[in-house]
Image (cartoon, rainbow, N blue to C red):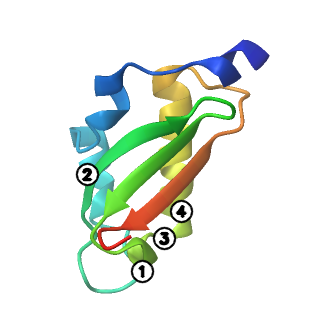
């Protein structure tokens, strides 16, 4: 399990965030009535795997969507049993 903590994804893997499975969940991801738009994501660090996502307003992201993304990344990229950090930043940051 610990070897997964040192995995670095290919540049295009996490950078292509707006895929169908993630976009389908965006409709219910916002805590307010404004739509949440995540432009892209990138892997910022390897140990622990840290992903940074850039959105129109990071305060709109609901905790359940954060958890959904963590679990989706674990399944898709083989991070089972590894701590993952996810940061969401507003466009202005």
Return the mark for residue 24. Answer: 2
Choose the circle earlier in sequence order: 2 or 4. Answer: 2
> Of helix, strand and loop, which one carries label 4?
helix
Question: Does residue 1 appear in the picture of this structure?
Answer: no
- In the picture as drawn, the residue positioned furthest to the right comes out as 2
Q: CA distance from mark 2 to mark 1?
A: 16 Å
Return the mark for residue 84. Answer: none
Asked where in the image residue 28 lies, by quadrant, the reply is: bottom left
Return the mark for residue 64. Answer: 4
Residue beneath disc 1: 31
Q: CA distance from mark 2 to mark 3?
A: 15 Å
Choose the circle earlier in sequence order: 2 or 3. Answer: 2
Q: Position of residue 92 (x, y in %)?
A: 31, 74
> Of helix, strand and loop, which one carries label 1?
loop
Q: Position of residue 73 (x, y in %)?
A: 49, 34
Front of the two marks 2 and 3: 3
In this rendering, the answer to whether 62 lies above or below 65 is below
Residue beneath disc 3: 62
Q: CA distance from mark 1 to mark 3?
A: 6 Å
Asked where in the image residue 37 lies, by quadrant, the reply is: bottom left
39 sits to left or right of 78:
left
């Amino acid at each position: 399990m610990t070897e997964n903590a040192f995995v670095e994804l290919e540049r295009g893997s996490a950078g292509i965030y707006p895929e169908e499975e993630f976009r389908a969940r965006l409709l219910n991801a916002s805590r307010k009535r404004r739509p949440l738009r995540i432009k892209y994501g990138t892997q910022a660090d390897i140990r622990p795997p840290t992903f940074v996502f850039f959105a129109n307003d990071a305060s709109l992201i609901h905790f359940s969507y954060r958890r959904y993304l963590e679990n989706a990344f674990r399944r898709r990229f083989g991070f089972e049993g590894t701590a993952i950090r996810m940061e969401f930043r507003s466009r202005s940051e």
